[in-house]
Amino acid sequence: MKTRFKEFNPKKFSFHKDPVLVLEDFWSKEERDTFLAAMAQAEWKKRSEIQATDLAFPNCGDWLKAQIAPTEGSVLLNRMALPCIADYIESFPRIKQRHMGFSYYSYGAGDCLSTHDDTDEQYARMDAVPGQTPQSLPPQRRIAVVSYFHHEWNPDWGGELIVYDSRKKKDGQVRLEVSYCLEPKPGSIVFFTVPRFHRVCRVDPLANEHRRMSIAGWFMTEHYS
Ligand SMILES: [Fe+2]
């Protein structure tokens, strides 16, 4: 489903029925300014400097990742406190704990994210505790989120989020079909249930110095074994 935030009824929407939700005008220009100012203060790391992302996403350019600031993290969580998210998360049995994790991302010309379904356990473990492999299972990602904070984006600049439907063929192979091709529209937010194959198209050299500034992460659950 794709709609404007002010026209969206989070009580009527169900991720069980519609696994992809796109809300436009989720953030005002002033709110985006606040996030961009916080991003400007952040300590960014290159993809190639982060062991987990370097292994999981080779040849994907050198996008940047940073920890979300506490104030902006709270603003984000308050805005995302939607009944449709809580209902979906709570529909999983035997939940021990609920988790959330969100980061800033900055993609420039040449940067992309190859196709994956957000279930790579090894990556999730290393991402949770960089540099080491914890003994217990990482929380399971249930809803993926990405939201865009740059003020301007031109179709020629690339960087679209492609979301796929996966179908199993008779020979057992998985075939992917594009279900959504979403330009990184300023102020929009995308939610989709995990597992779900997706990728970020390479930002085109035509973007010049423009960067695709986003916050992305997951709502997760940890379960009793
Ligand atoms: Fe992903």
Image: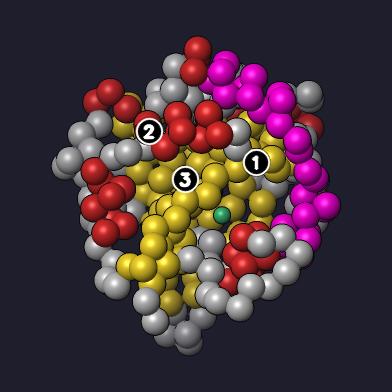
Q: Which mark is residue 78?
A: 2
The span shown in magenta is: 32-56
Outermost residue, top direction? 30
Predominant SS of the magenta segment: helix
Outermost residue, bottom direction? 171
Identify which amino acid the numbered label 3 is placed on: Val
Q: Label 3: how many residues lie within 10 Å, few (<14), some (14-19) or many (20+)?
A: many
Does the magenta-highlighted stretch encompass residue 189?
A: no
Spot occupied by residue 192 in the image (x, y as percentages of width and height): 41, 51
User: Is 44 located above or below residue 198 in the figure?
Assistant: above
Mark 2 secondary-structure assignment: helix
Spot occupied by residue 85 in the image (x, y as percentages of width and height): 31, 48
- Mark 1 and mark 2 lie on one chain; the one further toward the N terminus is 1
Identify which amino acid the numbered label 1 is placed on: Gln
Judging depth in this view, the residue of 182 and 84 nearest the camera is 84
Q: Label 2: how many residues lie within 10 Å, few (<14), some (14-19) or many (20+)?
A: few
The residue carrying mark 3 is: 145
Residue at image point 42% right, 67% down: 222
Distance from the alpha carbon under mark 1 to that under mark 2: 18 Å
Spot occupied by residue 100 in the image (x, y as percentages of width and height): 47, 51
Count of numbered circles in the view: 3
- Toward which corner of the image does residue 44 lie, by quadrant? top right
Give left or right: position of 7 versus 158. left
- Mark 3 and mark 1 lie on one chain; the one further toward the N terminus is 1
Q: Quadrant of ligand 1?
A: bottom right
